[in-house]
Image (cartoon, rainbow, N blue to C red):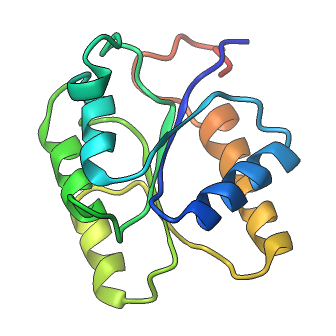
Amino acid sequence: MENKIILLVEDNPDDEALTLRALSKSNVANTVVVARDGVEALDYLFARGAHAGRDPEDKPAVTLLDLKLPRVDGLEVLAQIRSAPATRLLPVVILTSSREEQDLVNSYRLGANSYIRKPVDFAQFTEAVRQLGLYWLVLNETPGDPPGATR
């Protein structure tokens, strides 16, 4: 089974640790690359800056994107992902604690594949991450996946 990468874009160290723990507890063994702000996420996706040596064809299977990020916010990251032909079709899941209806609307307007509000309870959060991993890493097919391929 190919080890597809998960790009976690999260600036809060507690939320990062919680997400990584939930992934591990859910037996999601995929490599997780963490970007702690919007610039770092874009640099990773477009293989520039600190990630200039990375193969730009090695794209994440899914990007888990927080909205409230320093330097470049999550909505702008999403807009840049969708505006570039090389990343336009990447699955992007908004994983945020934002309760603002406008964030939800703007995320979908800009092309988010899914919008998940982080549950406060760890058990609920772990279950949400387990389901997210099952769907996006096992069940979902993306352009370029050969028939019958597993992630």
Who's the residue at 25% across and 33% down the image?
43
Instruction: Determine if residue 130 is in view.
Output: no
Where 124 falls versus 26 (above or below)?
below
Instruction: Determine if residue 70 is in view.
Output: yes
Residue 29: x and y in percent read 77, 30
Image quadrant in which you'd find residue 16: bottom right
Residue 127: x and y in percent read 80, 63
Residue 63: x and y in percent read 46, 44
How many numbered marks does the figure carry? 0
Q: Which of 82 and 40 is in front in this view?
A: 40
Where 91 falls versus 114 (above or below)?
above
> Would residue 89 appear left or right of 123 to someone viewing this image?
left
Who's the residue at 50% across and 17% down the image?
145
Who's the residue at 35% across and 57% down the image?
112
> Would residue 19 appear left or right of 69 to someone viewing this image?
right
Image quadrant in which you'd find residue 151: top right
Residue 11: x and y in percent read 45, 60
Residue found at the very far bottom of the displayed protein? 100
Q: Quadrant of the N terminus?
A: top right
Where 140 falls versus 94 (above or below)?
above
Who's the residue at 24% across and 46% down the image?
39
